[in-house]
Amino acid sequence: MELRLDGRTALITGGSRGLGFAIANRFAASGAQVIILARRQDALDGAIDTLRKSTGGRVQGYACDVANVDQIETAMERIWLSSTGVDILVNNAGSSVQRPVAVLSTELMQTDFNLKLVAAVQLSQFVIPRMKEQKWGRIINVVSANGKAPPAGGAPTALSRAAGLALTKVMANELAPHNILVNALCVGYIESDQWRRLHQIEAPKLAYEAYLQEKARVIPLGRLGKAEEFASVACFLASDAASYVTGTAINVDGGRCPVT
């Protein structure tokens, strides 16, 4: 089945690398006009250039720290001036921060919620009016499977991601009458630059491939996922093929999460 997004405009946060970049690449290759947000201008420029060359698609980008309300407002104003609006929103920006509750600071917890939850709400508020007008919209919240099955020492990420799951269900119920579908994608172990950083911290003397094999022992499929595999599921949810799917939280984790 070929999934097409022709005529749609997609906004993807954290789009300069990792999962956000893979989603942007898949969406652009599927015919969508793609707008990416990222904090660093140099990373943004490089990603836009690569995406345009690899897909031949229409790709724009704006430097924006989505944890900053003022920067979100400025970026959205620029988007309204350069496009007809946003049909698909992917709230992907985030990072993995983990601390035991006993040493979890209020500042760190608030920062994490601002980045992963508050930003998702604010960006959704910007795009929902147009989606309502046209009776069509897609919002995808990228969260973590740990939001369903929080591990010890998993705060604040597990907390903010669990809140993201609740937000997804609330929004799906509110927006369904307008044909705006809201779903969550729960990230498992996906190969990324983050794993190379963790490798250097956790086992620098172990070969990288051997390190990944050790991590894959807890995954029923026996391997880490690819960013492209994650992007394929996002493309399905963004397409008309998923027109009866809303309020779901799909694990893209090779079967690792014990909760469906």
Image (cartoon, rainbow, N blue to C red):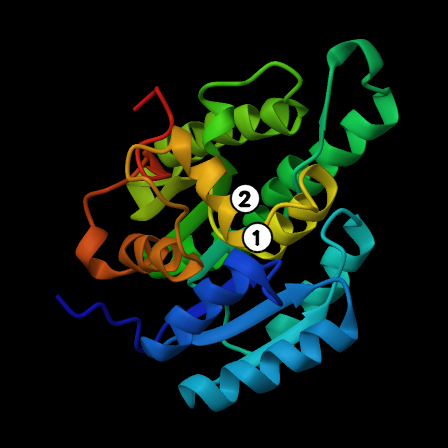
* Secondary structure at numbered mark 2: helix
**Camera-side residue of 69 and 31:** 31
Above or below residue 53? Residue 252 is above
The answer, for residue 86, to whether it is visible in the render is no
Residue 185 found in image quarter:
top left
Q: Are marks 1 and 2 in contact (CB under 8 Å)?
A: yes
**Residue at the (54%, 78%) spot, across then down:** 83
**Residue at the (73%, 37%) spot, across then down:** 114
Q: Amino acid at mark 1?
A: Tyr
Left or right: 15 as drawn, with respect to 54? right
Query: Label 2: few (<14), some or many (≥20) within 10 Å?
Result: some
**Camera-side residue of 138 and 152:** 152
Above or below residue 177? Residue 75 is below
| Residue to which mark 1 is pinned | 208
Left or right: 247 as drawn, with respect to 63? left
The x, y position of residue 112, in whole percent, is 73, 34
**Residue at the (78%, 67%) spot, across then down:** 40
Residue 175 found in image quarter:
top left
| Residue to which mark 2 is pinned | 211
**Residue at the (62%, 67%) spot, across then down:** 16
Q: Amino acid at mark 2?
A: Tyr
